[in-house]
């Protein structure tokens, strides 16, 4: 059993995402972001609610989780949809918690998968401590989460909603073993390099081109992260090492909604 939180946090793209071998399934390591959230409200004020999903989908979701007749909660959210930040997964997870769900995270993940077709592992307390197959809703492997770090990021280009049938992602199978080794040793420099490789492969295959690699070089970032579907883009820094003017540099380069947040073991 789990204790239902009042807030479900989103993510900010992925540390990496792609296919496990050229014809393998799509898997990812999500990048949790506690600055983005869906919140269960008790005062009736809301700007996001169950209207994101058709009634027939919500009825199927309710049945899968055996929620009975409990009303859906009112929600508020600051997650922009279509930006690769988990708006739909976080909303479904918050709806379930607010309606009384207290079962295993995997049950919730499978119910979300049935509605979305591809889901993020936001129902786990450490979603970045796993390699997650987002189209089949299974944990491929577990790995220590990255060490503490800071992401400075924003949104590049138009929103892009995830298509669950889209499997046109680059092969990242060669990145998994070095990622696990670097995560276990807390080697943020290597993790930043691997995240950058995943991001660059995705950009080369799927686009759109962005200024992140140049910004990383100019600002001395350890690497680049992106939403492999969606507009979220970010730079990786060690804690207390974000250069002054980083936010302005991203804004000048054309990113919108620029902000920074801590992630990793912190």
Image: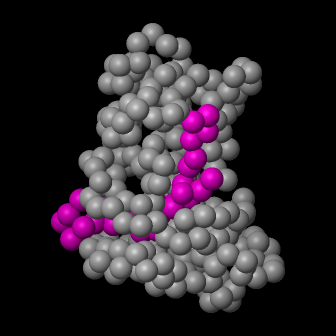
- Position of 185 with respect to 252 (left or right) is left
Q: Is residue 77 visible?
A: yes
Residue 217, position in %: x, y? 62, 89
Q: Is residue 12 magenta?
A: yes
Asked if residue 179 shows in the view, the reply is no
Q: Residue at x 44, y 29 (%)?
A: 102
In the image, residue 128 above or below residue 208: above
Split into 4 quadrants, where in the image is the C terminus? bottom right
In the picture as drawn, the residue positioned furthest to the top comes out as: 69
Residue 8 against residue 225 in the figure, above or below:
above
Percent across and percent down for residue 211 are 61, 78
66 w.r.t. 96: above or below: above
The color scheme shown is: one colour
**What x and y, as percent, mark residue 42?**
69, 22
Residue beneath the point at 67% across and 75% down: 239
Provide the residue span drawn in magenta. Answer: 5-34
Q: Residue at x 74, y 21 (%)?
A: 43
Count of labels in the image = 0
Q: Looking at the magenta stretch, what is its main secondary structure?
A: strand
Say which quarter of the image contains residue 131: bottom left
């Amino acid at each position: 059993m789990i204790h239902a939180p009042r807030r479900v946090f989103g993510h900010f793209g992925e540390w990496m995402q792609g296919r496990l071998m050229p014809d393998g399934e799509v898997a990812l390591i999500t990048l949790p972001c506690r600055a983005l959230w869906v919140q269960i409200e008790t005062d009736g004020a809301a700007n996001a609610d169950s209207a994101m999903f058709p009634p027939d989908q919500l009825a199927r979701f309710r049945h899968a989780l055996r929620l009975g007749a409990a009303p859906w909660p009112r929600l508020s959210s600051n997650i922009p949809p279509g930006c690769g930040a988990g708006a739909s997964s976080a909303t479904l997870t918050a709806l379930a918690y607010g309606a009384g769900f207290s079962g295993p995270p995997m049950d919730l993940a499978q119910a979300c998968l049935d509605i979305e077709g591809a889901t993020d592992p936001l129902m786990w307390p450490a979603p970045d401590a796993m390699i997650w197959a987002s189209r089949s809703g299974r944990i491929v492997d577990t790995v220590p989460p990255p060490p503490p770090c800071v992401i400075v990021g924003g949104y590049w280009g138009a929103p892009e909603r995830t298509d669950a049938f889209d499997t046109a992602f680059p092969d990242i199978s060669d990145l998994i073993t070095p990622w696990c080794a670097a995560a276990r040793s807390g080697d943020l420099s290597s993790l930043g390099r691997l995240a950058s490789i995943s991001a660059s492969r995705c950009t080369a295959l799927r686009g759109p081109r962005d200024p992140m690699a140049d910004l990383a070089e100019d600002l001395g970032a350890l690497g680049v992260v992106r939403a492999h579907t969606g507009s979220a883009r970010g730079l990786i820094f060690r804690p207390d090492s974000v250069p002054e003017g980083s936010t302005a540099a991203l804004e000048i380069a054309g990113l919108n909604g620029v902000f920074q947040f801590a992630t990793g073991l912190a």
